[in-house]
Image: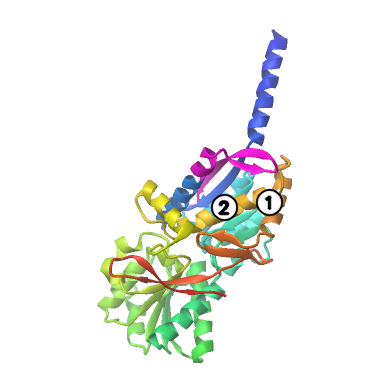
Amino acid sequence: MKKILFALLASVLVFSSVAHAESIKIGFNIPLTGDIPDVGESSKNAAEMLLKQINDAGGIDVGGTKYTLEFVYEDNESKAESALSAARKLVTQDDVLGIIGPQSSKQAVPAGEAANDLETPMISPWSTNPDTTKDRPFVFRGCFLDPFQGPVVVNFASDEFGATKAAVLYDIASDYPKGLAEVFKEAWEKKHGAGSVVAFETFTTKDVDFSAQLTNIVNSDAEILFVPQYYNEVPLIVKQAQSLGWDKPIIGGDAWAGGDLMSLCGDDCKGYFFSTHYAAAGAQGATKEFIEDYKAIYDKTPDDVAALTWDSTNLMLEAIQATGGLTGDIDEDRIKVKDALGTIKDFKGITGNMTFTPEGDPIKCAVVVKINDAGEFSFYKQVCP
């Protein structure tokens, strides 16, 4: 009887070992709750769509071995401390090979520190703050950086509207808007001279009354207003600015496209422009195919976060395949994936082609979109490095 039990136990252990060896875990550090749940929803939607496509096709081949994929989702609640905890849990408890996310810089910067310290490859699809990847060889991103995005907005506003004086309103307590606002100001004054940013107004996360700051902006000589805020904050700012008499252009950054902006802003946002990563309206090729597949499943047009999550997850998978084979030692394999990520050239993503710099940042183009009369984010122009 003991021999039979031992044989059964041994077979279970062998089966478990084989099953573990034939699956790859990828972690997702995303905001399923908190201030920007649409970002988490878009991230998970894109991931689940990709997971099904790959597993239904039999998984991925790595060095001649077929692996199915397992995605593990951790809710960072759109908080820096939760993103840090989520990163640590994914690495030390869930044993993921790599991490996708966090999305926003406020969470990606601290989570990136944890991933790097724990020597686990991480790709942030949407974080544009340079600190996310700075001096962190295990951390990458799937988007352009603010030092590129800021001048894109400056040059567009200057050329499109002939503006020489600008105003900025931003959240000083959040990494993404603060970083982008500062880059914009530096680039604007480099182009138009010191003091040409005639109003540089701040508020703090969770504020809902911007009347004092906007009154200063309306009373300034500013010809455009730059609002580098998240989609859920933009409508309040826009409506209050218009109620105070602002009738000039308002321009945003890529976080405008990170959620359902138009259901919150409606007609008030139509006609405005923002810099971003891709334009769904008028997309062609693989991008169009992705959009159609996503709409068929979720009955909505995928936003930038969904598209960038798709690209970033595929980047991680391409790196895993580029290792030539996994050893089964999770620590060793994480290093192999990190090394492979750094060698990727000319990756053809649905948000554009990209090649990584030694710092883990992609060289890729930005898109300026216009919110048209139908409330769509329509392609207006492309700006490349």
> Does residue 51 appear in the picture of this structure?
yes
Q: Mark on residue 254?
A: none
Dot 2 falls on a residue whose secondary structure is: helix
Please report the residue visible at 68 percent of the width from the left and 13 percent of the height from the top. Answer: 5
Q: How is the image coloured?
A: rainbow
Q: Which residues are magenta?
A: 51-76
Magenta stretch: residue 90 in it?
Answer: no
Compare residues 302 and 133 and report the one nearer the observer.
302
From the viewer's side, name the closer residue of 206 and 134. Answer: 134
Q: Amino acid at mark 1?
A: Ala
Please indicate whether residue 267 sits to the left or right of residue 170 in the image: left
Residue 385 percent coordinates (x, y): 57, 75
Q: How many marks?
A: 2
Q: Is residue 187 above or below residue 100?
A: below
Q: Position of residue 329 (x, y in %)?
A: 73, 41
Which of the marked residues, 2 or 1, is nearer the chain's N terminus? 2
Taking the image as shown, residue 366 lies to the left or right of residue 213, namely: right
Residue lying farthest front?
285
The label number, if any, that marks residue 314 in the structure image: 2
Q: CA distance from mark 2 to mark 1?
A: 12 Å
Q: Residue at x 43, y 57 (%)?
A: 288
Badge 2: residue crowd in 10 Å (few <14, some 14–19, many ≥20): some
Q: Which mark is residue 322?
A: 1
Q: Nearer the viewer, residue 139 or 152?
A: 152
